Image: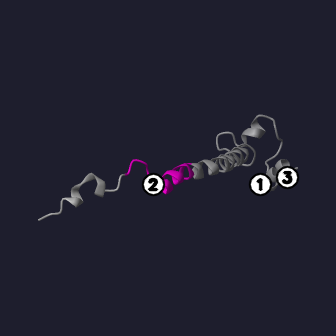
């Protein structure tokens, strides 16, 4: 026969509150990706700027037969990557 003590509400642990370790780790799980976000956005912005600069100053386009910057009169000759680096870095 089964003991009546094991089925009484007093014999089972009462769990009204979540586990403290689980509760305290939730915000950290959300903060880790948020801390990396500015660094990722900064890297993305730098990569897009480099791509746009290369596209406009260093790459000859087939339809224009020159770079867009040369077609707009911004530069007079085709830039190399070294020229682009020197212009950006000073």
Q: Name the N-terminal-most of marks 1 and 2.
A: 2
**Tag 2 secondary structure:** loop
Nearer the observer, 52 or 63: 52
Percent position of residue 31, x then y: 59, 49
Percent position of residue 52, x then y: 69, 44
In terms of image quadrants, where is residue 63? top right
Q: Name the N-terminal-most of marks 3 and 1.
A: 1
From mark 3 to mark 1, how far is it between C-alphas? 9 Å
Depth check, mark 2 against mark 3: the one in front is 2
Is 22 included in the stretch rendered in magenta?
yes
The residue under label 3 is 86
Query: Which dot marks residue 19?
Result: 2
Query: With respect to residue 5, does 58 lie above or below?
Result: above
Q: Which residues are magenta?
A: 15-30
Evaluate if marks 1 and 2 touch, with contact meaning CB atoms under 8 Å apart. Answer: no
The residue under label 1 is 81
Is 19 included in the stretch rendered in magenta?
yes
From mark 2 to mark 3, how far is it between C-alphas? 57 Å
Does residue 45 appear left or right of residue 75 in this picture?
left
Nearer the observer, 71 or 3: 3
Q: Name the N-terminal-most of marks 2 and 3.
A: 2
Does residue 43 appear left or right of residue 33 in this picture?
right
Type of secondary structure dominating the magenta stretch: helix
Does residue 34 appear left or right of residue 89 in this picture?
left
Evaluate if marks 3 and 1 touch, with contact meaning CB atoms under 8 Å apart. Answer: no
From mark 1 to mark 2, how far is it between C-alphas? 57 Å
Nearer the observer, 19 or 30: 19
Percent position of residue 24, x then y: 53, 52
Residue closest to the far bottom:
1
- At 56% from the left and 52% from the top, the residue drawn is 28
Does residue 1 appear left or right of residue 57 in this picture?
left
């Amino acid at each position: 026969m089964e003991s009546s003590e094991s089925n009484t509400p007093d014999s089972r642990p009462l769990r009204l509150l979540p586990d403290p370790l689980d509760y305290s780790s939730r915000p950290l799980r959300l903060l880790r990706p948020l801390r990396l976000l500015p660094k990722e956005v900064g890297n993305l912005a730098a990569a897009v700027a480099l791509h746009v600069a290369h596209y406009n100053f260093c790459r000859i386009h087939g339809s224009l037969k020159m770079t867009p910057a040369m077609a707009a009169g911004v530069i007079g000759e085709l830039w190399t990557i070294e020229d682009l680096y020197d212009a950006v870095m000073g």
